[in-house]
């Protein structure tokens, strides 16, 4: 059945009251591609913005099977025990490519999702990584306005999505497991360079010693890396998301991080930089969409594309022609 549309006021009041069904609908509104929804969403966001910004935003990444959902469930429940309200968002690059999702298609975080102090939202589907990311940024704003003071942003360790998540969180945690025979995989991929902490998960049972060895390897490796957050050296810890051991240390570490970086002003500084970067990536995105959707430009591009395919036009010359035609439109020479 079609639900009645809410007014801007109803969205705003509902979110500010922490009404979860309305929070969910607000995020659905934000994720909608329809122009009329975009307009309402923009007004809602504008009203919510003054109420946002007060959470701690934590990015969590790791390959499938590293234990992200298990970790988020255990960690999230502990945070709630400590008086926090936890929102879990996801940036899933697979959903745009395969139309399926690596993150969202199993029953995940069952206890956490039933808890009144938690809100779990799967990754927006469809669109480019940039599109998914901008929706997630807006969802962070909405969750904060709804009173969630810890936002966990989960992503799979695939390609660009980790860098994207890094650009919207205060603290970035990389979840690893030992015994995969390729312990330093993350280092090779450069992902560890953007981590504030590496956590070796599944340090339980027979695996404790192996996890400790992996921890040492990472310790040695990160020694040579430049910290991603000024004044904070990447920490390496072990934990078991299954038993909960090591999780309180992780929580303390992250809150230490917040305290230290807030004192030095680095925390606030990064938030400002992130806002500016978000601004620029929105301009990039809108420019591209406008440019490639413009009928004349599209026709021109299609014509030139054929010439390039048939080998009668050099790609650089073609690009030059497209740009000249475009610039001549906006800034006609007298
Ligand atoms: P994700 O794909 O990264 O979200 O990983 P999951 O949380 O779904 O975990 C993958 C598998 O590892 C599941 O079978 C979990 O039960 C298991 N697992 C997760 N954390 C731990 C842990 O700390 N110890 C052990 N022994 N198993 C774990």
Image (cartoon, rainbow, N blue to C red):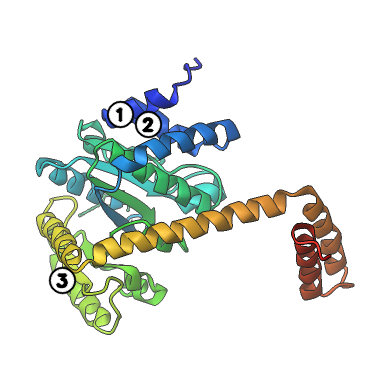
Left or right of 257? Residue 301 is: right
State yes or no: discs 1 and 2 in contact (Cβ < 8 Å): yes
Label 3 CB sits under 8 Å from any ligand 1 atom: no
Picture coordinates of residue 24, whole percent (x, y):
37, 31
Q: Farthest residue to the front: give it.
A: 334
Which residue is under mark 1? 20
Residue in the image at 34% along x and 51% along y? 154
Q: Nearer the viewer, residue 89 or 178?
A: 89
Which residue is under mark 2? 24
Q: Is residue 152 above or below residue 13?
A: below
Can you tell which quarter of the image residue 327 is in? bottom right
Alpha carbon separation for disc pair 1 and 2: 6 Å
Can you tell which quarter of the image residue 52 is in? top left
Residue 161 in view, yes or no: no
Left or right of 75? Residue 315 is: right
Residue in the image at 41% along x and 47% along y? 136
Picture coordinates of residue 290, whole percent (x, y):
67, 50
Alpha carbon separation for disc pair 3 and 2: 41 Å
């Amino acid at each position: 059945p079609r639900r009645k549309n809410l007014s801007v006021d109803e969205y705003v009041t509902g979110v500010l009251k922490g009404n979860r069904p309305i929070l969910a609908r607000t995020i659905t509104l934000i994720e909608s591609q329809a122009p009329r929804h975009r307009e309402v969403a923009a007004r809602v966001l504008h009203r919510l913005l003054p109420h946002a910004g007060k959470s701690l935003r934590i990015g969590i990444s790791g390959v499938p099977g590293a234990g992200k959902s298990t970790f988020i469930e255990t960690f999230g429940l502990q945070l709630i025990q400590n008086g926090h309200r936890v929102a879990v968002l996801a940036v899933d690059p697979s959903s745009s490519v395969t139309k399926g999702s690596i993150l969202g298609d199993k029953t995940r975080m069952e206890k956490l999702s039933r808890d009144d102090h938690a809100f779990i939202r799967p990754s927006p589907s469809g669109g480019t990584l940039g599109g998914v990311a901008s929706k997630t940024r807006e969802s962070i704003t909405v969750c904060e306005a709804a009173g969630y003071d810890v936002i966990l942003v989960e992503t799979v360790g695939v390609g660009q999505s980790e860098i994207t998540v890094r650009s919207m969180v205060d603290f970035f945690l990389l979840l690893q497991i030992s015994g995969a025979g390729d312990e330093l995989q993350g280092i090779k991929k450069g992902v560890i360079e953007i981590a504030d902490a590496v956590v070796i998960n599944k340090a339980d049972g027979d695996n404790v010693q192996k996890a400790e060895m992996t921890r040492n390897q990472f310790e040695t490796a990160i020694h040579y890396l430049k910290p991603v957050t000024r004044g904070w050296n990447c920490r390496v810890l072990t934990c078991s998301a299954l038993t909960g051991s090591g999780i309180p240390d992780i929580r303390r570490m992250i809150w230490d991080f917040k305290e230290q970086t807030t004192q030095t002003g680095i925390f606030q500084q990064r938030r400002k930089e992130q806002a500016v970067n978000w601004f620029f990536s929105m301009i990039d995105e809108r420019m591209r969409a406008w440019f490639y959707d413009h009928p004349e430009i599209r026709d021109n591009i299609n014509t030139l594309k054929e010439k390039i395919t048939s080998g009668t036009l050099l790609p650089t010359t073609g690009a030059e022609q497209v740009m000249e035609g475009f610039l001549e439109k906006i800034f006609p020479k007298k």
